[in-house]
Image (cartoon, rainbow, N blue to C red):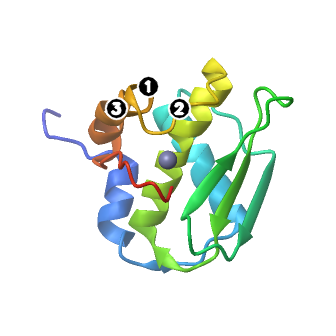
Amino acid sequence: MSELVLHPTRLHMRKHGFRIVKPSAPLVRYWWGRVSRELWDGNLPQPTKISIRPDRKHWAWVAIYNDRPGEFDLEMDDYPLVKKRFIEVLTHESVHAHLWVAHGDNRTVHGPAFMQFRHRIKRTYGLKLGKDVNV
Ligand SMILES: [Zn+2]
């Protein structure tokens, strides 16, 4: 009742966060859907195209095109990583995607428009919104 109820995704990360996962398009679609529902009121569409391929420079990348408003592609490095980091990377990318889809913002990198969502992400998932340049 008055006990603190842990968010299901926080609970999931607590239980399974250190398992190694291999990025795949279905796994990205599943977690992107959850992030959309849990952080963006279900208003964040799925990526038009998901590419999982060796990169080694970026964990993931939201690719936007000025002639395709409201949609985006998601590219992700195929290197296995722990589940918590996987969710953290998608959460980070979801902020970039939100700024583009909802505001047509194609310039923001990790400035104030981006960082304003750090409280929401901390409150909901207990994750930090990182400024890593590699995501
Ligand atoms: Zn970023």
Near-viewer residue (5 or 126): 126
Q: Is residue 89 left or right of residue 50?
A: left
Q: Is residue 117 left or right of residue 41?
A: left
Q: Which residue is the site of mark 1?
A: 113
Q: Is residue 43 visible?
A: no
Residue at the (59%, 59%) spot, across then down: 60
Q: Which residue is the site of mark 2?
A: 108
Place of residue 41 in the rendered image (x, y in percent of width and height, measured from the top left): 54, 26
Asked if marks 1 and 3 touch (Cβ < 8 Å), the reply is: no
| Disc 2 packing (10 Å; few <14; some 14–19; many ≥20) | few
Place of residue 126 in the rendered image (x, y in percent of width and height, measured from the top left): 27, 47
Q: Is residue 106 left or right of residue 123?
A: right
Asked if marks 1 and 2 touch (Cβ < 8 Å), the reply is: yes
Which numbered disc flags the more N-terminal residue, 1 or 2?
2
60 to 42, vertically: above or below: below
Q: Which residue is the site of mark 3?
A: 120
> Which amino acid type is shown beneath numbered disc 2?
Thr
